[in-house]
Amino acid sequence: MTQLNLLEIFAEHATGTLSTADSQGKVDAAVFGSCRLIDDNTVAVGLGNNRTLANLKSNPHATLLFATPSPSVFSWQGARIYLELKELVDTGSLFDEMIAEIERKAGKMAARTIKTVSTFSITEVRPIVDF
């Protein structure tokens, strides 16, 4: 998948499902509207003080799923983006930009729930349906 494909996916999908697991392998999946493609290899996500954040502190691996359903599962659009946590930030320009963007899109209440911004390296990108 090319950078152009990733840009299209992030532009077309307002929300994605971020799946994480703790150090024991207990899985969690949560819907996020704060996913942002920073560059060819970096994704940022605004996080509250929740299970996703707790999982990432003990296990840096995650998967971000974007999907647009259609009548046949074989024609669904989107991607599975495999990630590895680079850092968690709660200050600085990226944090401030993400908070402002979330406030514009979802309101002040949503922006206030964000406690940290996670940045991830993209380790692999796969289609929704892989033959």
Image (spheres, rainbow, N blue to C red):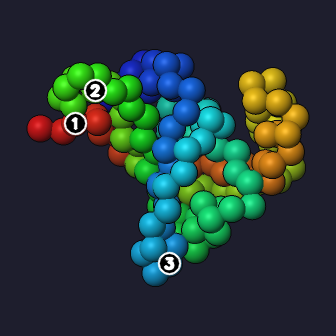
Q: Earlier in the sequence, mark 2 or mark 1?
A: 2
- Give the secondary structure at mark 2: loop
**Residue 118 sits above or below residue 33 on the image:** below
The x, y position of residue 11, in whole percent, is 53, 19
Q: Which residue is mark 3?
A: 23
Question: Which badge, 1 or 3, is on the more N-terminal residue?
Answer: 3
Tags 3 and 2 touching, CB below 8 Å: no
Q: Quadrant of residue 75 in the image?
A: top left
Q: CA distance from mark 2 to mark 1?
A: 7 Å
Q: Report whether residue 7 is seen.
A: no
Q: Secondary structure at mark 1?
A: loop
Quarter residue 129 falls in: top left
Query: Real-space Cα distance between discs 1 and 3?
Result: 28 Å
Mark 1: few, some, or many residues within 10 Å (few <14, many ≥20)? few
* Residue carrying label 2: 76
Name the residue beneath numbered marker 1. 129
Q: Residue at x 45, y 24 (%)?
A: 9
Q: Residues within 10 Å of mark 3 (few under 14, many from 20)?
A: some
